[in-house]
Image (cartoon, helix red, strand yellow):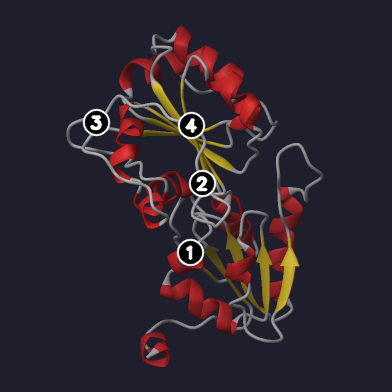
């Protein structure tokens, strides 16, 4: 069956690079192209957010090379990672650059692709399930719901300097976006909360932190904008995490399908509930 599915898909050619999204963690969320690439690559250059269970799908003999970037920790420089992909391709390797989530959603895949273009390296982009959608789905939180919102805004919690981005128009987002999804936000949650409340968001607005989304280690903290900083500190939760702000968080008691598999009783639709940390 697998051979039949793979037979119609493109193949990684020697001297080329595939920039591939691995999804939020669960290996079942890998695309067919991602899974096929893992059986063909000579070397997989992966980041810190790629789940170990995904890496186990690599073919025997495939070289695994870590090139992770984690905020606040010693990390490879982006330019060095990009040039390493060029070097490997120029040596004739079939290169798989495996990135958590989607390479083009706060994944710096565009920077790596532009470096490949500058050195005339052929490449393919393989999108992945981004954590801001897939990770929240595993927590039972939809990013859109007809009775709640018709728009959603995706933000990053820090820029290349490690600080909250100055370019974000918090006033516009605070007033105009009913649901806000923030990547890499835990370190600066106090400033982010202050910015949103100053922009007019209610301190009582529901917020959820989803840590290690879609993995067996997934944990979810349901809180409010006004108490988010204190509740995160008290919980002991650590990144990686995705943060969602908005009334859709109130749907979790009804839509926590993963919790239901472990015995949680789902309740009729509820857009006002605020809970505690759960697995």
N-terminal-most mark, 4 or 3: 3
Disc 2 on helix, strand or loop? loop
N-terminal-most mark, 1 or 2: 1
Which residue, given by chain and number where applicable, does mark 3 sit on?
Answer: 149
The image quadrant of residue 153 is top left
Give the distance between the C-alpha atoms of the residues marked 4 and 3, in whole angstroms. 24 Å
Give the distance between the C-alpha atoms of the residues marked 1 and 4, in whole angstroms. 39 Å
* Foreground: disc 3 or disc 2: 2
N-terminal-most mark, 1 or 4: 1
Give the distance between the C-alpha atoms of the residues marked 3 and 1, in whole angstroms. 31 Å
Which residue, given by chain and number where applicable, does mark 2 sit on?
Answer: 279
Check residue 125 in the rendering and tell me which mark sits there, or answer none.
Answer: 1
Q: Position of residue 193 (x, y in %)?
A: 52, 17
Q: Residues within 10 Å of mark 2 (few under 14, many from 20)?
A: some
The image quadrant of residue 272 is top left
Q: Position of residue 214 (x, y in %)?
A: 49, 54
The image quadrant of residue 83 is bottom right
Q: Residues within 10 Å of mark 3 (few under 14, many from 20)?
A: some
Check residue 276 in the rendering and tell me which mark sits there, or answer none.
Answer: 4
């Amino acid at each position: 069956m697998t051979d039949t599915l793979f037979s119609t898909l493109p193949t990684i050619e020697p001297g080329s690079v595939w920039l591939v999204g691995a999804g939020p963690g669960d290996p079942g969320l890998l695309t067919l192209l991602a899974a096929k690439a893992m059986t063909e690559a000579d070397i997989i250059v992966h980041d810190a957010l790629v789940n170990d269970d995904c890496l186990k799908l690599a073919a025997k003999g495939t070289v695994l090379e870590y090139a992770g970037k984690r905020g606040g920790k010693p990390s490879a420089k982006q330019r060095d990672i990009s040039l390493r992909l060029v070097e490997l391709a120029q040596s004739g390797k079939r290169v798989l650059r495996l990135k958590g989530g989607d390479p083009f959603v706060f994944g710096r895949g565009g920077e790596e692709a532009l470096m490949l273009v500058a050195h005339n390296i052929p490449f393919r982009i393989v999108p992945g399930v981004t954590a801001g959608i897939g990770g929240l789905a595993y927590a039972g939180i939809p990013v859109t719901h007809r009775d709640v919102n018709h728009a959603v805004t995706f933000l990053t919690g820090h820029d290349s300097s490690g600080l909250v981005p100055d370019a974000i128009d918090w006033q516009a987002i605070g007033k105009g976006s009913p649901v806000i999804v923030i990547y890499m936000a835990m370190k600066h949650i106090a400033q982010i909360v202050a910015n949103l409340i100053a922009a007019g968001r209610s301190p009582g607005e529901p917020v959820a932190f989803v840590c290690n989304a879609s993995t067996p280690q997934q944990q979810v903290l349901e809180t409010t904008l006004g108490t988010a900083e204190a509740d995160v500190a008290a919980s002991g939760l650590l990144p990686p995490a995705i943060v969602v702000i908005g009334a859709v968080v109130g749907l979790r008691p009804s839509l926590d399908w993963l919790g239901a598999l472990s015995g949680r009783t789902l309740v009729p639709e509820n857009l006002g509930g605020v809970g505690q940390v759960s697995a």
